[in-house]
Image (spheres, rainbow, N blue to C red):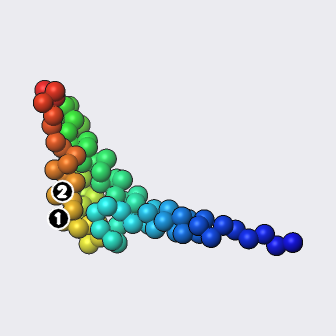
Amino acid sequence: MATQSAPSAEPEDNKVIKRYLTGDLGEDMSADLNYTVKRLIRGLTSDNHAVKQGYFLATSAVLARFKKPIDGLKLLIMISEETKTSKTMK
């Protein structure tokens, strides 16, 4: 007896796969690279200046290596969003 899978399961699987294979910063960018760039940008907001220098060096190295798949405009928007300060922050 053959069982049929639910027709809605396949499109959901495709969405997960597509989301994993692409990132927020460009169509050719993987989700892993997207996560890496996002974490590096967040690290730039550290209070520790030595840590901030390390994150800057790592960020510039990653951006230099992967400049083709990253959309520059989307990168600037992400930097702006990730480095916003609120009134409660010092």
Q: Quadrant of the N terminus?
A: bottom right
- Determine which residue is flagged by label 2: 77
Residue 40 shows up from this direction? yes
SS at circle 1: helix
Question: Percent x, y for residue 82?
Answer: 22, 46
Query: Circle 1 is placed at which residue position?
Result: 73
Which residue is at a point 78% across and 69% down the rendered structure image?
Answer: 3
Give residue 73's position: percent from left, percent from top: 17, 64
Gap between marks 1 and 2 measured at Cα: 6 Å
Considering only vertical position in the picture, is 46 above or below 62?
A: above
List the single residue furthest toward the right. 1
Classify the position of the C terminus by image quarter: top left
Q: Are marks 1 and 2 in contact (CB under 8 Å)?
A: yes
Residue, x 18% and y 56% (percent of image)?
77
Q: Amino acid at mark 2?
A: Ile
Element class at badge 2: helix
- Residue for point 25% across, 57% down: 61
Relative to residue 35, is residue 67 drawn left or right? left
The residue carrying pointer 2 sits among few (fewer than 14), some (14 to 19) or many (20 or more) residues within 10 Å by Cα, namely few
Q: Name the spot of residue 30 as percent of width and height, x first.
A: 39, 64
Residue at image coords 12%, 30%:
87
Nearer to us in this view, 36 or 23: 23
- Could you say which is closer to the camera, residue 6 or residue 84? 6
**Residue 13 x/y as whole percent:** 56, 65
